[in-house]
Amino acid sequence: MENYFEYVLSSLTIDDVFILGALQEAEATAGFKAVSNADLQKTVAFTEATYRRTINRLCANKFVETINVKKQNLLYLTEYGIAAVTKSLERVGA
């Protein structure tokens, strides 16, 4: 299982890591701390297509979860997302 996590982690793009980092900076690590989809998109300033593609990939890999509150989509890091950010930062020596 650890090898699979490392494999998925090695395939993350810079956009993936940037969004994971933005969620960590916003301390969105649980459902009650989730950040709105619109606010995150403004923070990262990606094009609509790049943003959606990246979020969909992160959700599929279970690094990010979405919840719907009052007709608004909110995003937060999962346990795997937090581990991915931590390991990515360790790899670059930050």
Image (tube, rainbow, N blue to C red):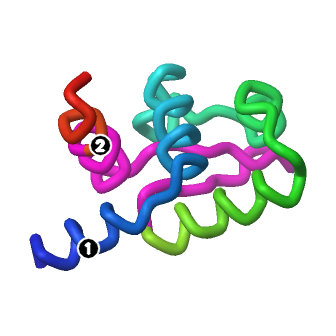
Quarter of the C terminus within the rendering: top left
User: Quick check: is 71 in the magenta stretch?
Assistant: yes
**Label 1 neighbour load within 10 Å: few <14, some 14-19, many 20+:** few
Q: Nearer the viewer, residue 72 or 58?
A: 58
Magenta residues, start to end: 62-87
Disc 1 residue type? Tyr
Q: Quadrant of residue 8?
A: bottom left
Residue positioned 26% across, 34% down in the render: 92
Question: Does dot 2 land on a helix, a strand or a loop?
Answer: helix
Q: Nearer the viewer, residue 38 or 10?
A: 10
**Which residue occupies the foreground of this view, 18 or 41?**
18
Distance between the Cα atoms at labels 2 and 1?
A: 12 Å
Percent x, y for residue 81? 37, 50
Nearer-N-terminus badge (2/1): 1
Q: Position of residue 32 (x, y in %)?
A: 51, 33
Identify residue type, mark 2: Ser
Question: Relative to 43, is 28 on the left or the right?
Answer: left
Residue marked by disc 1: 7
Seen at 44% across and 45% down, the residue is 77
Left/right of residue 24 with respect to residue 89 in the rendered view = right
